[in-house]
Image (spheres, rainbow, N blue to C red):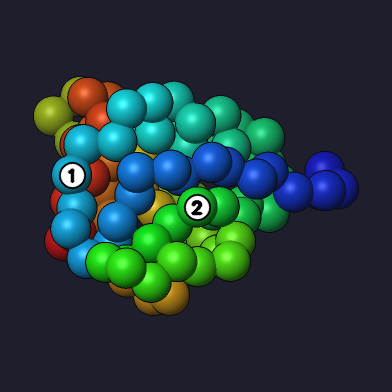
């Protein structure tokens, strides 16, 4: 195991209003590949802002493309390579 953590700037990620967040796919893929504990910074839910949130990051293959699965508070969010985020 590699020590430390990966702090990901998630500015633009609003859990109450999911939308495209430029650059989020590559940031999360880099965090995943680091094999470190992941903290998501600058996440909000409507007008509520969060301190850094611990998250689980995994990948899955959908139609031959890698999709990032970001799990925050037991809720999975799927991030496609065009930076679109959906909750499924």
Q: Are marks 2 and 1 in contact (CB under 8 Å)?
A: no
Q: Which mark is residue 8?
A: none
Mark 1 closeness class: few <14, some 14–19, many ≥20 residues within 10 Å: some
Residue 12, image x, y percentages: 34, 44
Give the alpha-carbon distance from disc 2 to disc 1, as whole Å.
15 Å
Residue 46, image x, y percentages: 26, 66
Q: Report which residue position mark 2 lands on.
A: 42
Residue 46 or 56: which is nearer the viewer?
46
Describe the element under mark 2 as helix, strand or loop.
loop
Tell me: residue 54, above or below residue 18.
below
Q: Is residue 60 visible?
A: no
**19 lies left or right of 68:** left
Tell me: residue 83, above or below residue 52.
above
| First along the sequence among labels 2 and 1 | 1
Residue occupying image coordinates x 29% and y 36%: 21
Res 11 quadrant in image: top left
Mark 2 closeness class: few <14, some 14–19, many ≥20 residues within 10 Å: some
Residue occupying image coordinates x 74% and y 48%: 5
**27 lies left or right of 81:** right
Q: Closer to the camera: disc 2 or disc 1?
A: 2
Res 47 quadrant in image: bottom left
Q: Report which residue position mark 1 lands on.
A: 19
Residue 32, image x, y percentages: 55, 39
Residue occupying image coordinates x 49% and y 31%: 27
Tell me: residue 25, above or below residue 59.
above
Q: Is residue 63 visible?
A: yes
Describe the element under mark 1 as helix, strand or loop.
loop
* Quadrant of the frame with the C terminus: bottom left
């Amino acid at each position: 195991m590699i020590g430390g953590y990966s702090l990901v700037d998630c500015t633009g990620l609003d859990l109450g209003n999911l939308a495209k967040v430029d650059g989020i796919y590559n940031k999360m893929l880099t965090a995943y590949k680091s094999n470190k504990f992941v903290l998501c910074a600058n996440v909000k839910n409507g007008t509520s802002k969060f301190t850094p949130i611990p998250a689980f990051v995994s990948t899955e293959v959908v139609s031959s493309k890698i999709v990032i699965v970001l799990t925050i508070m037991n809720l999975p969010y799927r991030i496609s390579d065009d930076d679109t985020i959906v909750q499924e």
